[in-house]
Amino acid sequence: MKKTTYEISKMDCPSEENLIRMKLDGIQEIKNLDFDIPNRKLAVFHSGNTSEIEKVIAELNLGGKKIASEQTDETDFKENANQKKLLWAILAINFAFFIIEMTTGIISKSMGLVADSLDMLADSFVYGISLFAVGGTMIKKKQTAKLAGYFQITLAVIGFMEVLRRFFGNDKLPNFSTMIIVSIFALIANAICLYILQKSKSKEEAHMKASMIFTSNDVIINLGVIVAGLLVNWLNSSTPDLVIGTIVFALVTQGAFRILKLSK
């Protein structure tokens, strides 16, 4: 048995962990995967060589590179019986905030909230595909990933078009207080998701470090919308909201292409 450690420089949140898990699913040589999100590392316990593993990790464009490989006698890998239950909980939280942020974003005329809602939807897709794949065939998983990826890209393109329309139009200013309040609650929700998933792994990891929370792109996006809300009020301009919306739509599009890679 070998243990090969990879640095995944762009692995910032649990949804990306699930992307990697799904992409590596089906490689018979792999016996266990051990993720360390705060330090952006993945330990793969496997037999044989790592060529196929490295090829699959590279296809996701998450900055994966091998940093160490060693023999190990570890063979007792405990499966988490609550994993499916936890995935459902995280899926529910993300999808609920997709609806909340989409609704309040439309009402408050905030593209930042609308874009962040799509980021929440993107995470929901990843967890949904993970759950759908449990006991399902590889073909079904790939078909679901393709559908989710294209749907996400379509929504992002519509979002980009709306940003352009508002930039050249004469729309009212977004409601900055709604932007800030909803984003604070979304920030709390993302922190809870990270806590739940890390707590499921071991008691030592249950005591989360502050650095763990703030490595998540989702949390950084929430903070970005909060700052944009403050700037909207201070500058009396919708430009900060449109800028953060554009940035998040770009991230959502990037995430969609990663999901599509699961269908190949």
Image (cartoon, rainbow, N blue to C red):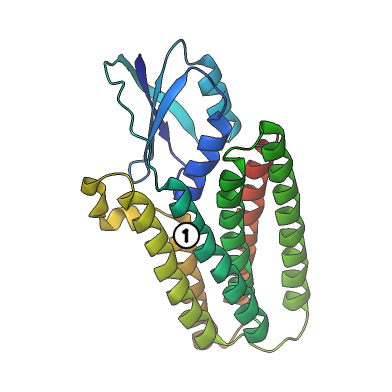
The local crowd at label 1, few if under 14, some if 14 to 19, many if 20 or more residues have their Cα within 10 Å, is some
235 above or below 164? below
Identify which amino acid the numbered label 1 is placed on: Ala
Residue for point 56% across, 62% down? 120
Q: Quadrant of the N terminus?
A: top left
Write down the quadrant of residue 25 in the picture: top right
Left or right of residue 147, residue 243 in this image: left
The x and y percentages for residue 125 are 62, 53
Q: Position of residue 65 (x, y in %)?
A: 45, 27
Residue at position x 51%, y 36% in the image: 21
Say whether residue 262 is visible. Answer: yes
Read off the residue under disc 1: 89
| Residue 245 position (above or below residue 209) | below
Q: Return the residue nearer the eye: 144 or 20.
A: 144
- Residue at 66 percent across and 37 percent down: it is 261
Residue 214 appears anywhere in the view? no
How far across and how far down the image is residue 198, in percent? 34, 50
Please determine whether, in this image, residue 191 is positioned above or below residue 151. below
* Image quadrant in which you'd find residue 135: top right
